[in-house]
Every structure is written in C-alpha cells, then in structure tokens.
Image (tube, helix red, strand yellow):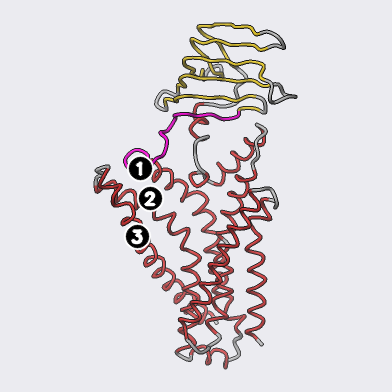
Amino acid sequence: MKILDKYLVKQFLQTLLFALLSFTLIFVVLDAMENLDDFIDESVEGKLVFQYYLVFIPEMIRIILPISVLLASLFTAGKLANLNELTAIKASGVSLYRLMIPLLITAVLISLFTVYFSGYLVPMANKHKVFIEQAYMKKGLVHFGSNIFFQDTESRIVTINYFDVSIGQANQISIQEFDSKDKTKIISRTDAFRMTFDSTKNIWQLFSGSTRFFYEDSEQLEKFLSKEFPSLHFKPEDVIKKQRKPEEMTLSELSNFSQEQIRTGNDATRTDIAYHSRIAFAFSSIIVVMFGLPISANRRRGGLAIQFGISMAVTFLYLVFMKISQAFGNNGVFNPIFTAWLANFIFLIVALVNLKRVMK
C-alpha cells in the first residue's frame, strides 16, 4: 500500500503546485491590469511594482489554496477513474475510505502549515504591501502616525494629531478623562504640544500644555511646561500598532490586541472573529478534499467538467456561508468561536453525508 499512497500523494501535490502557480499568475495579471493606472499616475518604479507583487503573492496563495486543493483532489481521483486505475484499485479490495487516507493526511499537513503561513508569514508580507500602497501608490490610506485616537482605559481617550515614528514623539496631544460611572461626563482634559516617552522611568512626559478640570458648576485651568503622565497604558511602539488592520496582524498580535480591547472596555468581538476565522479557514482544505474525492471518484455523465463545476459551487457556497456567519457574529448574534467554525462544521457534515451516499 505504501507504493499506492506515494503515487496518490505525488499526483495530488503535482496538481496542487500547478493549480497554485496557474491561479497566482491569473491573480497577478488581473490585479496588475486593475492597478496599472495607479502605477503610471504615481510613477512607481518597476522594481517597486515587482516588490509589490512579490509580497502580495502570499495573500493570493492563502485565498486560492482551498480551491487549488479542491482542483488537485478532483484531478487526482478523476485521472484514476478515466484511466480505469480506480476500478483496478477497487477490484483489489481497496475501498474509497482507504484511498482517501493519504490525501486526507496530506490535507491535514497542508492545513497545519496554512495556520502558520496565514497567521504569521502573510501578515508580515501584508505590512510591506500596505507600506508600498501608502508611500508610493497614494491609494487613499492615511500616513503612518497621523490622526490617531484610541481608548487607553474604560474612561480615558487619547488623541494624537501626528506621531513621529523615527523619534517616538507624539505631537498635539489631547487626553480626555471621563467619569467611570457616567461615561458622558468629562472630568478633565489635558492638551500638550508634544509628548515623549521616558524609557528609564517607563512613563510619558508632556510639554507645553494645560489641564482643565471640570466640576459641577465650575472648571479649573492648570498650565505646565513639563508634566509626567504615569497612568498612560501604552508605549511608543503600541501607537502604530493601533492603526494596523487585522490582515496586517499576526495571530499573536490579534490575540494581544483583543486582550487590550477588553482591558480598555471596548468590544473585541470582531478581532476575536478575525483570529478564529483565520485558523478555521486554514482547515477548509480538509473539507474540500472530502467533497472533491467522492464526487470525482463517482464517474457520471458530463465528466470532470461537471464534477468540477459542482465542487466549485459547493466551495463558493462555503465561502458565502462563512461571510454570512461572520456578519451575524460581528453583530453579536453568535459567539466568535462558533462564528468562525460554523461553516466548517456544517459543510463537514454535508461532506460526510455525501461520502456515505457515494459508498452505497
């Protein structure tokens, strides 16, 4: 059986590699046609265009991997069926269940690798891709460090007009404190021209500013040339992190960001869904193999084209269902973990029912 297993895995991986290369090339060509005007208008150099697509390829691979796995499973089983090799294998006493084992093991290994690939390598590439879009393509994205505002605690909001990344200095800062019992009631506001982080004391220091204290029927103004603000809960490197999109964050950064949102009293549902969905999507390769193999191994009129069309439709429904469940999860209807894995569980059940039907 080891010879048969090696043969199946070899055919599967060869087709998978071909599918990945083909789909990636198509994606690159289509995206290049869409962004051609931006490259020309902004006079982007050729080496930067090459660099842009070099760091964009990991994201493309993450998206097209389930479809490529589906195509590989279809063509592997379809080739066996068309060459009557599948008939010979079944005649020798090898069931479809046994035939699926090496490909399922391969799909599991691919899924485990995809968790690391999409969780850590893809976000690193996306960060550089976003940098090129911001710095050279001017695609309507804000500059790093400008117009930043975030919630530092449940009762404190920090606004920074511009943050100088090179020296770690914040400029034109406003810190607003609200009543912990009544969030609509402001109790103080501190404005400063600049703010720097003292790494020796591990605190922020504000310069050339003022603090207003608001009472029931009066207010008090205090001006200062220099003032320490030890209760701020962020560091210079955290300021830029707060501007990142989920696709630019690794799994570790998403987890930390979720914990920070909970600490500051914000809703971390969307972040949790993004975290768990990235893992759940990685395991979709196992589901498409369980769909593709039985359909392709069961020879029917219309051949491989019809089989591929059916499986593509199922895969499309899977992606649509995942997006719909995420929409419900973002609105708080579903638990984040349930939201992320719901599509996987439902389509896994459908795949098992289909496998049982084919085996009859």
Q: From the image, tell me which residue sits under label 1.
A: 132
Query: Of 44 and 100, which appears nearest the observer?
Result: 44
As measured in the structure, the alpha-carbon distance from the residue carrying label 1 to the one carrying label 3 is 19 Å
Mark 2 burial class by Cα count in 10 Å: few <14, some 14-19, many 20+ = many
Quarter of the figure with the C terminus: bottom right
| Mark nearer the N terminus (2 vs 3) | 3
Image position, residue 45 (x, y; %): 24, 45
- Cβ atoms under marks 1 and 2 closer than 8 Å: yes
- Judge depth for marks 1 and 3 and give the one in front: 3
- Judge depth for marks 1 and 2 and give the one in front: 1
Quarter of the figure with the N terminus: bottom right
- Judge depth for marks 2 and 3 and give the one in front: 3
Q: Secondary structure at mark 3?
A: helix
- Whether residue 143 is in magenta: the answer is yes
Image position, residue 72 (x, y; %): 47, 73
Q: From the image, tell me which residue sits under label 2.
A: 55
Span colored in magenta: 133-151
As measured in the structure, the alpha-carbon distance from the residue carrying label 2 to the one carrying label 3 is 16 Å
Q: Secondary structure at mark 2?
A: helix
| Residue 164 vertical placement versus 190 (above, below) | below
Q: Quadrant of residue 326?
A: bottom right
Q: From the image, tell me which residue sits under label 3.
A: 30
Image position, residue 32 (x, y; %): 32, 55
Mark 1 burial class by Cα count in 10 Å: few <14, some 14-19, many 20+ = some
Q: Amino acid at mark 1?
A: Ile
